[in-house]
Each structure stands twice: as C-alpha cells, then as structure tokens.
Amino acid sequence: MSDPTTDRTTDPTTDRTTDQATDKATDPAPVTVLGLGLMGQALAGAFLREGHPTTVWNRTAAKADPLVADGAKLAGSVAEAVAAGRLVIVCVTDHHAVDALLDPMSGHLDGRVLVNLSSGTSGQARETAAWAARHGGTYLQGAILAAPDGIGTADATLLYSGPRAAFEAHEPTLRVLGGGTGHLGDDPGLSSLHEVAVLALMWGILNGFLHGAAVLGAAGVDASALAPIARQGIGTVTEWLSGYARQIDEGVFPAFDSSLDTHVAAMVHLLQESESLGVSTEFPAYVKAVADRAVAAGRGAEGYMTLIEQFRAPSVVRAPSVEGGEGASE
Ligand code: NAP
C-alpha cells in the first residue's frame, strides 16, 4: 500500500515501513542473498544480525540451515528469492556461476537493484550490467576486500561501482556489511579493476614473504621469526606508497631514497643466497629480470618507480594463457 503524501510503503506481510526509493527507513530494509558459500553466509549473517528481513537461496539448499535457524527465509527458487525484495545480492564463485543465475532472474528484476559481490573482471561486470538493464534492473558491482570473518565489522572494505543513485539509495543497507563501504564511480567495471589491483598487491607481498620464509627455512630459521620483521618492513613500504603513487602519476622518478642500480645490486645478493641455499630462484630471478630491462633502457640512476614502464608494457615473459595453455605474449 502506498501513501502518496509520504512516498512510503507499508508492507502488509511485515508491517514495516520503508521509503519506496531508498533504504533510509526507520526499519531495516528487506534484502535477498543468492549464494551461501563462505562469503554469502557471512553476508546474510551480517544482515540478519542487524535485523534486516533476509531471504536466501543457494544451489545446495542445506547450506541455508544455520541462517534459517537465525531467522532467514529460504526461497524455493531464484525467482522467488528475487521477488522478495528490491535489493538482491549475488555472491557465487565466478561469472560462470553468476551466468547460471541470470536466466532464472529474468522477468523478475524489474525495479530491483542487483548487487554482484562475486569476483570477476571489469568486462564481465559491464556485460552483466547491460543484461540487467535489458531486464529492467539496475546493477552495482562490488568488490569485497575482506575475509568472511571481517564482514559486518568496521574494518571490512567493500567497494561498489555502477549508478551512484542506486548505491546511495541502498547505502544504509550495504554499509551493514562493512565500515569501509564506498562508491568508486558510475562505470560498473571499476570495482572489479580495484579488486584485481589489490589482489596483485596481496600476492606480491605473500610471494615475497614465502620466498623470505624459504630462504630462512633453508638455514633452519622458523617462519615465525620472519613474521614480526616482515610486519615492520611492510609498514615501512606502506609509508612510501603515497609519494611513489605521485611519481607514477607525474611520470617523474627521482632517486630520493635509492637508485634502481642500488636495488639491482641487492637483488644479486638475494639470487646468490637463494642459489647457494638450494632455494627456488624463480621469484628473485623475475624481480631482477624486470629491473635489468629498465637498467638496459638507461633508467638505472632513477628511483624504483621507473619500473612502472615495465609493468605497463606487454610482458616479454612467456606466461601460460588464461585457458591454461602456453601463451604467446612475446
Ligand atoms: P565458496 O565458499 O566456494 O562458495 C561458492 C558459492 O558459489 C556457493 O554458494 C556455490 O553453491 C555457488 N556456486 C558455484 N557455482 C554455481 C553455479 N553454477 N550455480 C549456482 N551457484 C553456484 O566461495 P566464497 O568464499 O563464498 O566466494 C564467493 C565469491 O566471493 C567469490 O567470487 C570470491 O572470489 C569472493 N570473495 C571471497 C572472499 C573470501 O575470503 N572467501 C573474499 C573476497 C571475495 P553451492 O553451495 O551449491 O556449491
């Protein structure tokens, strides 16, 4: 029932009152969560804890049991779940799994905001956004920069892209998932781009940590001894990032702290030490190969960020293709 003087709706099934166009309501807005893996369960659990009427669906229905015990409503089909509310959240493995849910959704998306928190590429996000628009829905792509146990805490960061108006309309509900909730821009591909950028950073740090642990382990030192030193080192590098980002944006790489030549000399030590300990040289050889190319291009006297050109250029390293075969990236 709609009251035109207030633009508010009383839902006869719940007797709750919410704004028609936004979640800025006195009562928590209804939300649907499709996909109840580790992350989907954490998302639905966070909504339930904050009192949102939560409808859930999962391909394997039994995974909904703990959520149903906490008050969630289990839908019998994707269509039924989507019909339950204006805000529909999808969190499944990848875009193939998302695609499997789209057909059952079509015909039920009119006026709804579909928020896809599944990982994917920016192209996949834009394609799904176009599909949603063709079916009368609005699409937000999200990137979850948190583990399931962080969902619902002030520390969790979730970044959204797509129409700002749709984000703002549902921001109070989306903010339940994490204190670091933000909107990156209208292009739905932006959050996937940010997600892969952060993943590149994470794997770079973790691979460096693993190599360090392998080097120390070969000398009989536990990885636990590296952890506090690594933490301090990562903190130091973190302090450099804003200044380095400015250098990349301005395209000027002064060697304020250390020249690339000095870095390369230390990279040789890492390679030699790894070789003599019988540890894999793959990671340090890669690091040095990238720097060697820049030195050969006459950049040795510049600062480390001069390597950005090596990362922008197509790789000269033969890498397996995304389909698992040999790539031809030379
Ligand atoms: P998960 O525990 O492996 O759960 C995967 C979910 O996808 C399950 O609900 C599964 O259903 C569903 N699914 C897979 N293929 C499907 C299909 N063809 N049709 C319908 N449903 C299908 O994975 P997760 O950890 O929840 O991750 C989900 C998404 O969140 C991923 O894109 C991941 O990259 C992203 N993410 C995860 C984390 C994390 O720390 N876990 C952090 C950031 C982002 P069944 O239960 O029936 O198998």
Image: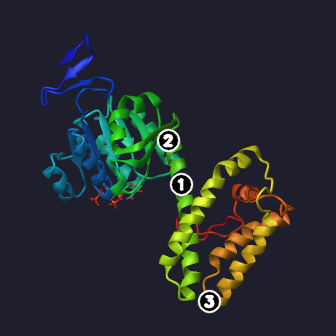
Query: What percent of the width, then of the height, locates residue 209?
Result: 55, 71
Element at badge 2? helix
Tell whether 172 sits left or right of 125: left
Could you classify mark 1 by the number of other residues whose Cα lies within 10 Å: few (under 14), some (14-19), or many (20 or more)? few
105 displayed left or right of 264: left
Figure quadrant of the N terminus:
top left
Whole-Å distance between the Cαs marked 3 and 1?
31 Å
Q: Left of 274 or right of it: where is 296?
A: right
Task: Say what amino acid the circle numbered 1 marks.
Answer: Val
**Quadrant of the image where one finds ligand 1:** bottom left
269 to 4, vertically: above or below: below
Q: Which residue is mark 3?
A: 278
Q: Quadrant of residue 219?
A: bottom right
The circle drawn on residue 257 is none
Q: Are marks 2 and 3 in contact (CB under 8 Å)?
A: no
Q: Residue at x 80, y 62 (%)?
A: 259
* Chain-order first, disc 3 or disc 1: 1
| In the image: residue 301, left or right of residue 34 | right
Q: Residue at x 47, y 77 (%)?
A: 224
Q: Is residue 292 in view from this perspective?
A: no
Residue 34 in picture, x, y percent from top left: 29, 48
Which residue is label 1 attached to? 198
**Quarter of the image holding residue 33?**
top left
Amino acid type assigned to the residue bearing label 3 in the image: Gly
The answer to whether one can see residue 269 in this image is yes
Residue drawn at (41%, 30%), measured in percent from left and top?
Answer: 168
Q: Which residue is mark 2?
A: 126
Q: Earlier in the sequence, mark 1 or mark 2?
A: 2
The one of 28 and 193 positioned closer to us in this rendering = 28
Q: Which residue is most to the right? A: 298
Of residue 232 and residue 154, the one placed in the foreground of this image is 232
